[in-house]
Image (cartoon, rainbow, N blue to C red):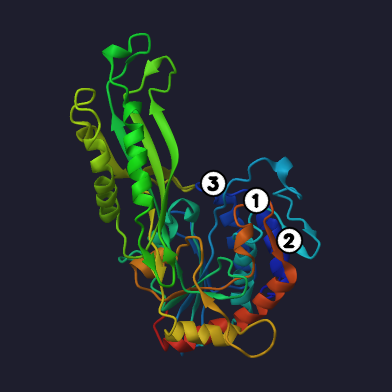
């Protein structure tokens, strides 16, 4: 590809290449190299990867506007059984007016549109455009947390995320946390249960507390209510002829922006306490002291070899609908019917890296991309090409409008 040859058709061909490269969290290396090659071929002024392997490209502006960051992410979720897909998940098939496959709309299709749209704006944008695609978004957002870290990280004036919005402007979402409730007992041979203390005996009290907790969730006028559900139970030791001395109940909690890890743990403990207090003292003295509540952690390793334990806590965020970035974006995008009305402004139903950019770091963040959220993480994933063509063209108005809304700012 010759330098500067940005186009919608080129973006779709690029997206097909990306779909054909599997990129589970921690395995994004080949995909990152393909993205770097595309940016270099399109004539980006600077292209690099950071310590974790996230890709960063810069299209320099004229110096008269703010710096806007376009961001998707490199990783994807698993495909499940390929036989259950209408089209093979890694073939990048175009059929019926849609691009099909894992990542078509979450998020390799929008990623490709961002990469080409930024290149198309070279020489036309007042401010710098930073195109940053992080690793590990699907498992807590480690890549973005690192990209916008306080010391030495990127600090754009605004962020536009490529998570699908069906052409709307997204201004926030609930966050997500995995909370573990661990009941401890005493292991023993299953042939002599009287010599052991079965940690599973505490499950009824734990699950009753979770039901109470689920019924007492708080709500936000825009984001709606938080929600929590038990999604897994694991016993250890795993041998079926051993009385388990540890049972872990995992909760999936969709949280509001003001929630913290400590506040979540405190609420779980409060919900469990009355149920654990009712456990028969003669059967299990001090039952409450046998239960631990913690935020789940996961050992993560990037394809560059960096390894750490990360809390499974992705924060939420919410922009003010009247913020200048939001109103400028809505006017620039408009609605697809050509009426001239501003785009619809709403939250996402799922979590994104905006929890890190806006919720934690305070950088104004919106979302805009083609694609319907209902297809995310399913075997029907697809990107409507007519909508994608419209969204690509709208990026050429959206980015300058947001740069104007944030005003002049230093290049990052």
Residue at screen point 28% across, 47% down: 271
The tag earlier along the polypeptide, 1 or 2, is 1
Q: Going from the N terminus, do you reach mark 1 or mark 3 first?
A: 1
In space, the residues marked 1 and 3 are separated at their CA atoms by 10 Å
Q: Give x and y (percent) for residue 33.
A: 58, 56
Q: Give the alpha-carbon distance from disc 3 to disc 2, as whole Å.
A: 23 Å
Instruction: Check contact, mark 1 vs mark 3: CB within 8 A.
Output: no
Residue 39 as seen in the image, left or right of residue 237: right
Which circle marks residue 21 in the picture?
1
Q: Nearer the viewer, residue 251 or 219?
A: 219
Q: Secondary structure at mark 1?
A: loop
Q: Nearer the viewer, residue 398 or 286?
A: 286
Q: To which quarter of the image does residue 269 belong?
A: top left
Given residues 335 and 284, the one toward you in this image is 284
In the image, residue 323 sits, relative to residue 235, either above or below, namely below
Q: Quadrant of the N terminus?
A: bottom right
Query: In the image, residue 264 lies at what x, y percent?
Result: 30, 53
Pointer 3 residue: 27
Residue at figure coordinates x 27%, y 51% from the top left: 267
Q: Is residue 179 visible?
A: no
User: SS at mark 3?
Assistant: loop
Instruction: Tell us which disc is closer to us: 1 or 2.
Output: 2
Residue occupied by mark 2: 99
**Residue 379 location (% of width, % of height):** 67, 50
Q: Answer yes or no: is residue 25 visible.
A: yes
In the rendered image, the quadrant that contains the C terminus is bottom left
Marks 3 and 2 close (CB-CB < 8 Å): no
């Amino acid at each position: 590809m010759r330098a500067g040859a940005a186009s919608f058709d080129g973006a779709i061909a690029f997206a097909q290449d990306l779909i054909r490269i599997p990129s589970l969290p921690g395995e994004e290396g080949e995909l990152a190299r393909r993205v770097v090659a595309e940016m270099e071929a399109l004539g980006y002024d600077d292209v690099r990867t950071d310590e974790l392997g996230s890709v960063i490209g810069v299209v320099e502006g004229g110096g008269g506007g703010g710096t806007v960051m376009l961001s998707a992410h490199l990783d994807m979720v698993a495909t499940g059984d390929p036989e259950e897909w209408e089209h093979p998940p890694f073939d990048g098939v175009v059929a019926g007016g849609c691009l099909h496959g894992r990542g078509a709309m979450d998020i390799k299709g929008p990623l490709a549109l961002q990469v080409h749209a930024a290149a198309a704006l070279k020489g036309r944008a007042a401010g710098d455009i930073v195109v940053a695609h992080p690793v590990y978004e699907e498992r807590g957002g480690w890549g973005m947390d690192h990209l916008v870290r306080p010391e030495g990280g990127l600090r754009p004036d605004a962020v536009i995320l490529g998570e699908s919005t069906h052409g709307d402007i997204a201004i926030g979402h609930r966050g997500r946390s995995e909370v573990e409730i661990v009941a401890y007992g005493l292991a023993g041979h299953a042939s002599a249960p009287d010599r052991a203390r079965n940690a599973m005996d505490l499950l009824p009290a734990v699950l009753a507390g979770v039901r109470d907790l689920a019924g007492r969730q708080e709500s936000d006028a825009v984001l709606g209510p938080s929600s929590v559900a038990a999604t897994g139970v694991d016993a250890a030791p795993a041998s079926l002829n051993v009385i388990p001395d540890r049972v872990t109940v995992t909760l999936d909690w969709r949280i509001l922006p003001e929630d913290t890890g400590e506040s979540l743990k405190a609420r779980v403990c409060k919900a469990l306490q009355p149920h654990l207090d009712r456990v028969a003292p003669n059967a299990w003295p001090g039952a409450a002291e046998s239960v631990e509540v913690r935020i789940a952690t996961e050992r993560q390793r990037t394809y560059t070899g960096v390894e750490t334990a990360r809390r499974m806590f992705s924060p939420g965020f919410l922009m003010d609908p009247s913020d200048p970035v939001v109103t400028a974006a809505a006017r620039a995008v408009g609605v697809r019917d050509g009426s001239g009305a501003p785009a619809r402004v709403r939250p996402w139903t799922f979590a994104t890296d905006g929890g890190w950019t806006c919720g934690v770091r305070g950088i104004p963040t919106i979302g805009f991309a083609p694609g319907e959220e209902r297809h995310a993480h399913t075997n029907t994933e697809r990107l409507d090409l007519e909508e994608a063509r419209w969204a690509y063209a709208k990026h050429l108005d959206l980015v300058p409008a947001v740069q104007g809304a944030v005003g002049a700012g230093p290049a990052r």
